[in-house]
Image (cartoon, grey):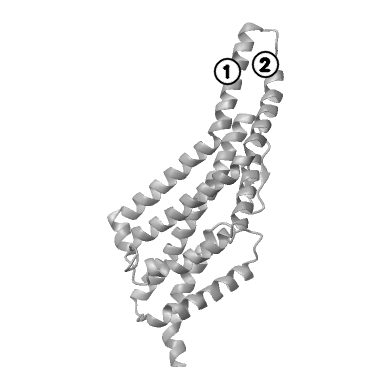
């Protein structure tokens, strides 16, 4: 009984970080995943981390303990947010493509988030999730979550990093990089649609009898869908590079908060 009383504060801290990660991280935060499963998975992973790491830790449950709980929740939310940004980059790229092709008016409801999403953005997001699960990316996420205690132990310096501004600067830089990645993913189709608009503009000037609105809408739609299918084979390599940058950014977050463990 004494061991349970002494170990419960440590287990609660571990449970807070892991469940906060599941609230934000893709795949695990999906509406299709039952809440019972999320809580149960978080509990058993917390139990594994507790027996492998938490038994050697000591925490005094005093008034400062509330701040430590908040700190662990913030760490879990930030880790999930960094991962979510790279999945959102694909939806942003799909939105840019939809605006150029003309599909922006036909948004659909994304079953994972429950909000309206662009057609191509939703399609690419589903494809991204499929590739992510095929390469066991969710296993790597769980491994990184469990290894985060080696980089960011329970006595980490999160609040001091927030006060110094280094953490805010890093998250802002990651957000900017993901938006740049979204532009790069959508760039081939956006450029092609711009050239199509340019060609239609020249056609209007040289042959005013053509109704550019009647010709342009189906032409851009057919050309845009053709380019999407033409670019499909390269999506696997693109997603692989995206995942590599995502895990590097997650490791960078670990280094910003605390730094690598000894010997690494």
> Dot 1 lies on which element?
helix
Q: Which residue is drawn at 55% across and 36% down?
A: 186
Which residue, given by chain and number where applicable, does mark 1 sit on? 198
240 vs 252, nearest the viewer: 240
Quadrant for the C terminus, please. bottom left
> Dot 2 lies on which element?
helix
Q: How far apart are marks 2 and 1 (CA)?
A: 12 Å
Percent of width and height locating residue 152: 38, 67
99 vs 185, nearest the viewer: 185
Residue 102 visible in the picture: no
| Placement of 248 over or under 105, stated as above or below | below
* Left or right side of 145 for 160: left
Query: So how many labels did they put on this image?
Result: 2
Mark 1 residue crowding within 10 angstroms, few (<14) / some (14–19) / many (20+): few
Which residue, given by chain and number where applicable, does mark 2 sit on? 212
Q: Residue at x 58, y 31 (%)?
A: 189
Percent of width and height locating residue 21: 50, 63
* Left or right side of 224 for 259: left
Mark 2 residue crowding within 10 angstroms, few (<14) / some (14–19) / many (20+): some
Q: Which residue is drawn at 52% across and 45% down?
A: 89
Residue 125 visible in the picture: yes
Percent of width and height locating residue 245: 46, 50
């Amino acid at each position: 009984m004494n061991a349970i009383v002494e170990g419960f504060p440590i287990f609660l801290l571990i449970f807070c970080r892991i469940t906060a990660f599941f609230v934000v991280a893709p795949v695990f935060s999906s509406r299709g995943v039952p809440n019972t499963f999320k809580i149960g998975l978080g509990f058993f992973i917390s139990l594994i981390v507790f027996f492998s790491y938490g038994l050697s830790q000591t925490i005094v449950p005093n008034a400062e303990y509330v701040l430590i709980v908040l700190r662990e929740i913030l760490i879990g939310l930030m880790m999930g947010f960094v991962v979510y940004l790279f999945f959102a980059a694909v939806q942003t790229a799909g939105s840019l493509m939809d605006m150029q092709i003309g599909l922006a008016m036909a948004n659909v409801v994304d079953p994972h988030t429950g909000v309206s999403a662009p057609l191509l953005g939703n399609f690419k997001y589903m494809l991204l999730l499929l590739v992510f699960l095929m390469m066991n990316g969710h296993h790597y996420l769980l491994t990184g979550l469990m290894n985060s205690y080696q980089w960011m132990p329970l006595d980490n310096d999160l609040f001091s990093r927030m006060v110094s501004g280094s953490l805010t600067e890093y998250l802002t830089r990651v957000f900017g990089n993901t938006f740049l990645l979204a532009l790069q993913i959508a760039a081939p189709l956006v450029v092609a649609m711009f050239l199509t608009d340019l060609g239609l503009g020249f056609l209007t000037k040289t042959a005013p009898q053509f109704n550019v609105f009647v010709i342009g809408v189906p032409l851009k739609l057919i050309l845009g869908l053709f380019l999407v299918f033409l670019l499909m084979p390269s999506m696997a390599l693109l997603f692989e590079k995206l995942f590599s940058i995502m895990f590097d950014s997650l490791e960078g977050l670990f280094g910003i908060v605390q730094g690598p463990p000894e010997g690494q």
